[in-house]
Amino acid sequence: MAQPAIVKSTCPYCGVGCGVLAEVSPGGDVAVRGDPDHPANYGRLCSKGAALAETIGLEDRLLFPEAYGRTTSWDDALNLVASTFTQTIAEHGPHAVAFYVSGQLLTEDYYVANKLMKGFIGSANIDTNSRLCMASSVAGHRRAFGSDTVPGCYEDLELADLVVLVGSNLAWCHPVLYQRIAAAKDKRPEMKIVLIDPRRTMTADVADLHLPIRPDGDVALFTGLLKHLASSPSLDRTYIAARTNGFDEALEAADAYDSYDVVQQTGLTAAALEEFYALFAATGKTVTVYSQGVNQSSSGTDKVNAIINCHLATGRIGKRGMGPFSVTGQPNAMGGREVGGLANMLAAHMDIENPVHRDRVQRFWQSPTIATQPGLKAVDMFRAVADGRIKALWIMATNPVVSMPDANHVEAAIRACPFVVVSDVTAATDTIRHAHVRLPAAAWGEKNGTVTNSERRISRQKNFLPLPGEARPDWWIVSQVAKRMGFASAFEYVSPSQIFAEHAALSGFENGGARDFDIGALRRTERGETHGWHLMGSVLGGYWFQYADVLHGPFVRLAYQEIRVKGFAERGNDSTALIYGEQRRESFISTLGWQVAGRIGNVRPFARVGFAFEGRDDPRFVSASSVTLGGHYSIPTLEADGNYVEYLLGASTDFGRVTGYVAGSATSGRSEGNDYGVTVGLRVPL
C-alpha cells in the first residue's frame, strides 16, 4: 500500500512563520500538522494553522484569466496588461501606474514586482497591505539603527527574565508565541510578564502585571521610563558612549515629562508606574514585544523609538534574552521589506533617497532606469487613483476594498480607475469584481518559494498540490508581463530558486559588511548558480566479506546526470552579472571503487572512494545482486567530460528488505571545478 507523501512547508497566516507538515495520501486527501523540527513553532500550531487542510478546496477559485468579463487565454490577458501599462506610461509618465501588493506574496513574487516597477518602469509606486500593520516599525528601526533591522529572535522570549507585551493580544493574534512564553514561565515561575494594553485581554491571564494604559499613552509611558532609567544604576553609560548618539537630546526631551504628566497621559496610577519602572530597571534580561497597538497609530513611529530608546540606554539589545521585538501580522511582511516592496525603500534594505544605493541597484539589475524618489504609500496611492493621477493599477493577493481605511472611498476610486488588474486566488472578493482583467494566481500548497517571519527566519513554502485550471504563480505572471513590456532579458526566470538567488546576491553586492542585511552566501553560486540533479542507479557487485560486522568490497555505480545552469556569474573582483539563457548538459557517469562499512545497531556508516569515468556514451548494463535508486542534489560547476575521483561518506539502515541511505559526496580532479552534494536513496534487492 502506498504511503502518504509528507512535504515540509510554512503556514501562510501570520508573521510567526510556523513550520507545517502537509501529508498527502495516495488518494489526494491532505492533512496538516505542525513540524516538530521547525524552530519557529517546534510542532505547535494555532487553530488557523491546524485547519489549513480545510482551505485548499476549489470553491470560488479563479481558475482562468478573464478580460472585461470574459474568459480569455493567458497570452491575450498578459498582452492586454502589458500593452495598457506601456501605453499609459507613454502617454502619462511612469507615475501614472501603480502596484498594490501584499504580505501574502512570497519573497520571489515581491522581488520581481519591485524590480519591474522601480528598475524598469522607473517609479516607486509600489506599496503593500503590510504597511497597515508594520510601517511604524520600519520607520522606527531606520531612525534608530539606520536600517530596518529586527534585533531579536523568538528564543529571546524564552530566555528573558522579563517580557513586556505592548499593544499585543498575543494569545489571540500570535498564539504560538504566546504558548512559547507561557511554557517558559511554567518552567521558570520567577520569569515576569507585563501586559500593557487598554483592555484586559486573554493575554493578561499569563501576566504578573497588567497596565490598562490610556490609548496612545505609550510614548509618555516609555519616555517616563527613560527618565527613570537615567537616574538608576541600570543605565549603561559605556554602551551609550560607544554605540549610540543623541542620548543627551533624548534625555532632555524626557526631562520635560514630570510624574504628573505621565500619570495624566497614561491614565495609570503613580504606584503602578513605579512598580513597572522598578521592575524594568532591575531586570537585565528584558524583551519588549510590541505589535499593532503600537504600530497602528498616528504616533506609531514615536512609540517604537520610545521603546527602543529604553533598550539602547540600558545596553539591552543584541544580547540573549534582551531587546525590542516587533511582531508582524502578515506572513511575509518581512520578506517584502527585504526585497524593497514598499514605496519608500529600495531592494535589500537600501535607501531610495541615497544616490549611491540607487546607482548600485541599477547596475546590479542592469536596468534602463531607477526610481529616484519615494512613491505613493498605500493610503495616498488610492487617493491618487481617486483623483485620476493613477490610471492603471495592479492589485496582487489582497482585498483593499475590505482592508483599507475609508473602504468606501477606496472602492469608489477602484471603480472609477480606467484600468484595474487583480491577481488573486478567488473570484469572489469585493475588489476583484471591479477588475478589468482578472488573473488566476497560485494558492498556498500550489506555489513554491520563501517567506521571512518576524524573527527574520527564511523558510520554504513548498507546493504539494497541482496548479488547478490555469492558475500560475505570481512571479511568473509579473515576469510574463515584464517580458511583453520589452524587458525580457531581465525577467527570464524559469523557477523561483533563480529569483531567490538573485535577491540573495543583491544583498551581498558591493556590501563588504557595510549593510547588515547580507544573505549573499545563500545565492548558491560559484561560477554560476547551478542546479544539478543526478538520477542514479548504483550496482553493487563482486564479492562481499563480513568480519566482525565490518563490510568491505568493490562497487560499480552507473548514473545519468543532468545539470541546468541559470543565474549569476562572477565577473571581475567585485561585480556580478546575470547569465541570461539556460545551459543544460546531460551525461552518463560510471564509477569503480571500494567501500568500507561498519555497524552500530541497525545503522551502518560507510565510506567510499571511487574513480569516475564521465562521458556521453550510454552506460553498459552490469549484472548485479541489488540496485540502488535515489536522487542526488549538488552544487557543481560546469566541467568538461573526463575522469575524476569521487568520495562518499554516509550511513544506511534497513527497512525490511529495503535499505535506505544518506551520504555527503565530494569530487576532486575535475578539470573545471569540483562539486559537493547530498545523496539519498533506497537499495532494493533484485
Image (cartoon, rainbow, N blue to C red):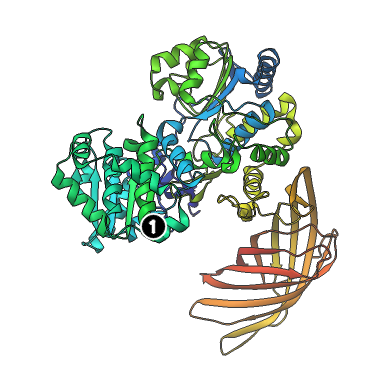
State whether residue 355 is above or below residue 396. Answer: below
Judge left or right: residue 551 versus residue 257.
right
Amino acid type assigned to the residue bearing label 1 in the image: Gly
State whether residue 667 is above or below residue 161. Answer: below
The image shows residue 121 at horizontal and vertical percentages of: 67, 26
State whether residue 109 is above or below residue 149. Answer: above
The image shows residue 679 at horizontal and vertical percentages of: 63, 64
Q: Residue drawn 57% across and 40% down?
A: 339
Q: For mark 1, give the secondary structure.
A: loop
Using the image as rendered, state which of residue 165 and residue 202 is in the foreground: 165
Q: Residue 646 is drawn in which quadrant?
A: bottom right
Using the image as rendered, state which of residue 523 and residue 607 is in the foreground: 523
Using the image as rendered, state which of residue 444 and residue 347 is in the foreground: 347
Judge left or right: residue 165 versus residue 386.
left
Residue on which disc 1 sits? 315
Tally of numbered discs: 1
Q: Residue drawn 72% across and 63% down?
A: 675
Look at the image and tell me whether residue 566 can be seen. no
Look at the image and tell me whether residue 660 can be seen. yes
Q: Residue drawn 49% across and 42% down?
A: 142
Q: Residue 56 is drawn in which quadrant?
A: top left
Using the image as rendered, state which of residue 524 and residue 238 is in the foreground: 238
The image shows residue 41 at horizontal and vertical percentages of: 38, 53
**Among all residues in the image, which is located at the extreme bottom?**
548
